[in-house]
Image: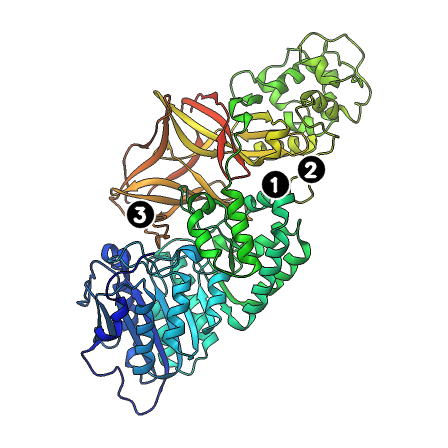
């Protein structure tokens, strides 16, 4: 962090140009101070000016009991009201246009002195019984802070600076409400800091829309009822924001919650206890710690290198209860006491409980130095846990040997050709090579997967296939599999009246590599831990395949598998199937695909795919999954260039299979700040889907797809079969350091419609 000239002389530069905002004999009921660091939100989109317009239209400034003061600055261009872009100014927001009160000079709104001076000015010149302070701009959570002045780039207001500013600005006075009209500022770090200065904190766990708080929706009622108490006002801020976001103006995910300060000491004690218990586990059970962390959805993250690593406290407690049941129960209860209002849009209601916690993961690889600088200077077991976790993730990568292997086809059927894969060897060994593809897919209880998940189904129907004898299941090593994998005609024996109860287990035993380099199903394996990384019995995988493919309306069924050796499995965090499209000498990444299951007892990985993919104008797009809702709908992001600006389309696949484009957002800027808001896609906009393309000589580049002009009826996103073309599939393996390594690819071909 660096400081620009002039901050230390701020008080001397403050020049009064108008009388104080009120000339009342008595105090007002409420003073609302708004610290408007316009940044590119104002210079490019005029969002700060729009909010000033909302403040004016609310009529709050005409009330004798409510005063709204705004500090403006931080933007290279202000689009309305004649506001200066060269210096910070103070305005009384009332009447038809804001009234200029004072000029503070060419100072940095990302500096503690600038904020402290504005707070002092507001308290001195607009005294009231109650006071709310709103901080407006981009936000980057506890690591990156907020209020990055566009005229002083690279120097946002950090949390230590915020504490300093409030300490000096308030000078012992206490705020009723401290609100953050900025992204990702709801977290334990921020709310614990705010608790020292305000009774209630209003902040969002997620990205905040461009317009931010709906100022007229809560200021107008305040002007009409100036006796409104602090909690009611804070709740109105949160609820009207979410209602406005859900009204269609922004068409995006929205969260805003109210946290009561008197409950935060209990939260910080519980967080410290959680940290104190988790830190020593990083030495003895790091794989468990990381695998649980990998399950958690981080707010405001897209498919790029930037990250927030802010996770929902309730989700955190539910995940880590497998390791720390008592600490998680106490933390969950403490957080529930602190959150007095949790407003969310319907699409994220199950993901956001109202309070977040910073848990390094992706940030440890990208912003290690910033994290260490921020948290090594703090006391407490939580800070120690953060630095230890960041250290562990940043310690280096493990080069998986599986990255040099290819996945193996377990069962592949395109709806037309004969199915192939290891499962077919089993099937043909049982039935002989007489069943056609369609018969195979629909035999044994309605489908191949039903036949396998119901042991009797494998054997049922044999009597309907004259001439096909059933090989007897024996206890020999490899069981049924070893007798079938050669695809030699078995010795004819009468079909048993009842199949052996462990028939599928025999098949599985022959499929698993049990050499000394691999885990054996019954051998001790520390990877198998209840609630963390469990063994997956054969029937569970078959049932998962049955459920996955029966939910699809496509005939295509692809299941690929890989078995990791002991060392690779010990270093594995997660695995996903990844789809590429072949374009000349490049592999174009389309994203994670299907459903992947890991059997932590043996290292077997199964990945299923039905051949369906999101498309715009018939072309597959790069789709990166963000999170899955409880109703089965999936939110994902599509990289694209919109009217020349790199952004992300926000989309959802609904539970009924339909897909919708919700809008577009920019993601993160070059300094790690989340860029506020989504925009609707309007008629005539130019949309170019973007992809990452890897050439055969190892060069990575960004590749643009065919441009699409948004029609009057809007973009049509369809979840449909992949068009004809050459595709490649591999597994993406995430190791304990968070690095993703890819296996060798296998070719996929789809006939198209």
The furthest residue to the bottom: 25
Q: Which residue is under mark 2? A: 526
| Nearer-the-camera pick, 106 or 416 | 106
Q: Residue at x 55, y 58 (%)?
A: 382
Question: For the residue carrying disc 3, how many other residues have a C-alpha within 10 Å: few (<14), some (14-19), or many (20+)?
Answer: some
Q: Which residue is under mark 3? A: 681
Please tell me which of labels 1 and 3 falls first in the chain: 1
**Residue 334 has which mark?**
none
Q: Secondary structure at mark 1?
A: helix
Q: How far is disc 1 from disc 3 in space, using C-alphas? A: 43 Å
Q: Secondary structure at mark 2?
A: loop
Q: Is residue 533 left or right of residue 748?
A: right
- Front of the two marks 1 and 3: 1
Tell me the quarter of the picture where residue 110 sits: bottom left
Q: Position of residue 744 (x, y in %)?
A: 49, 23
Quadrant location of the N terminus in the rendered image: bottom left
- Front of the two marks 2 and 3: 2
Establish if 334 lies above or below 528: below
């Amino acid at each position: 962090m660096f400081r620009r000239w002039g901050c230390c002389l701020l008080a001397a530069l403050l020049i009064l140009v108008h009388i104080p905002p009120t000339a009342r004999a008595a105090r007002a009921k409420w003073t609302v101070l708004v610290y408007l660091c316009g940044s590119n939100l104002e210079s490019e989109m005029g969002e700060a000016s729009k909010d000033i317009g909302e403040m004016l239209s609310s009529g709050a400034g005409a009330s004798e009991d409510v005063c709204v003061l705004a500090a403006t600055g931080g933007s290279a261009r202000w689009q309305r009201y004649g506001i200066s872009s060269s210096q910070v100014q103070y305005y009384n927001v009332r009447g038809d246009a804001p009234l200029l009160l004072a000029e503070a000079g060419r100072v940095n709104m990302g500096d503690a002195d600038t904020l402290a001076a504005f707070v002092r000015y507001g308290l001195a010149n607009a005294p009231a019984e109650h006071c709310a302070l709103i901080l407006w701009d981009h936000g980057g959570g506890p690591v990156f802070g907020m209020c990055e002045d566009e005229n002083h780039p690279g120097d946002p207001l950090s949390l230590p600076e915020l504490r300093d500013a409030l300490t000096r600005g308030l000078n012992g006075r206490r705020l009723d409400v401290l609100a953050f009209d900025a992204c990702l500022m709801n977290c334990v770090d921020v709310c614990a800091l705010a608790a020292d200065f305000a009774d209630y904190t209003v902040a969002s766990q997620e990205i905040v829309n461009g317009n931010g708080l709906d100022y007229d929706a809560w200021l107008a009622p305040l002007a009409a009822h100036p006796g409104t108490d602090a909690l009611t006002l804070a709740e109105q801020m949160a609820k009207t924001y979410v209602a406005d976001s859900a009204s269609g103006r922004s068409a995006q995910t929205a969260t805003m919650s109210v946290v009561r300060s008197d409950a935060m000491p209990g939260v910080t004690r519980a967080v410290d206890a959680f940290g104190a218990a988790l830190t020593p586990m990083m030495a003895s059970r790091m794989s468990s710690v990381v695998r649980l962390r990998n399950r958690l959805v981080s707010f405001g993250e897209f498919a790029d290198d930037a990250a927030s690593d802010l996770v929902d406290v309730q989700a955190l407690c539910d995940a880590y209860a497998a390791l720390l049941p008592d600490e998680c129960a106490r933390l969950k209860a403490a957080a529930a006491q602190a959150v007095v209002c949790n407003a969310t849009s319907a699409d994220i209601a199950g993901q956001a409980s109202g309070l977040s916690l910073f848990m390094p993961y992706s940030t440890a690889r990208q912003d290690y130095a910033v994290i260490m600088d921020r948290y090594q200077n703090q006391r407490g077991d939580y800070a120690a846990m953060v630095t230890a976790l960041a250290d562990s993730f940043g310690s280096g990568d493990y080069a998986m040997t599986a990255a040099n292997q290819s996945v193996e086809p377990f069962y592949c059927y395109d709806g037309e050709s004969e199915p192939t894969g290891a499962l077919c060897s089993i099937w043909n060994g049982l039935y002989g090579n007489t069943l056609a593809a369609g018969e195979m897919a629909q035999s044994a209880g309605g489908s191949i997967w039903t036949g396998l998940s119901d042991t009797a189904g494998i054997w049922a129907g044999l009597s309907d296939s004259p001439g096909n004898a059933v090989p007897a299941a024996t206890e020999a090593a490899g069981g049924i599999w070893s007798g079938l994998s050669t695809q030699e005609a078995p010795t004819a024996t009468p079909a048993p009246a009842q199949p052996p109860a462990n028939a599928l287990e025999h098949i599985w035993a022959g499929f698993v590599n049990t050499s000394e380099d691999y885990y054996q199903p019954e051998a001790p394996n520390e990877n198998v831990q209840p609630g963390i990384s469990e063994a997956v019995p054969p029937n569970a995988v078959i049932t998962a395949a049955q459920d996955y493919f029966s939910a699809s309306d496509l005939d295509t069924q692809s299941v690929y598998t890989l078995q990791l050796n002991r060392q690779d499995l010990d270093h594995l965090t997660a695995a996903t199937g990844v789809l590429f499209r072949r374009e000349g000498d490049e592999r174009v990444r389309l994203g994670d695909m299907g459903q992947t299951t890991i059997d932590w007892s043996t290292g077997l990985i199964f990945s299923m795919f039905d051949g369906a993919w999101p498309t715009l104008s018939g072309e597959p797009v790069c789709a990166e999954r963000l999170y899955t809702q409880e109703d089965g709908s999936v939110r994902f992001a599509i990289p694209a260039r919109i009217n020349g600006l790199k952004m992300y389309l926000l989309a959802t696949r609904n539970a009924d299979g339909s897909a919708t484009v919700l809008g577009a957002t920019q993601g993160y800027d070059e300094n790690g700040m989340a860029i506020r808001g989504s925009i609707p896609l309007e008629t005539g906009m130019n949309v170019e889907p973007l992809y990452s393309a890897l050439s055969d000589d190892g060069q990575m580049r960004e590749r643009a797809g065919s441009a699409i002009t948004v029609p009057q009826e809007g973009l049509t996103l369809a979840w449909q079969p992949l068009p004809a073309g050459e595709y490649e599939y591999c597994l993406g393996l995430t190791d304990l350091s968070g690095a993703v390594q890819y296996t060798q690819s296998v070719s996929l071909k789809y006939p198209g419609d």
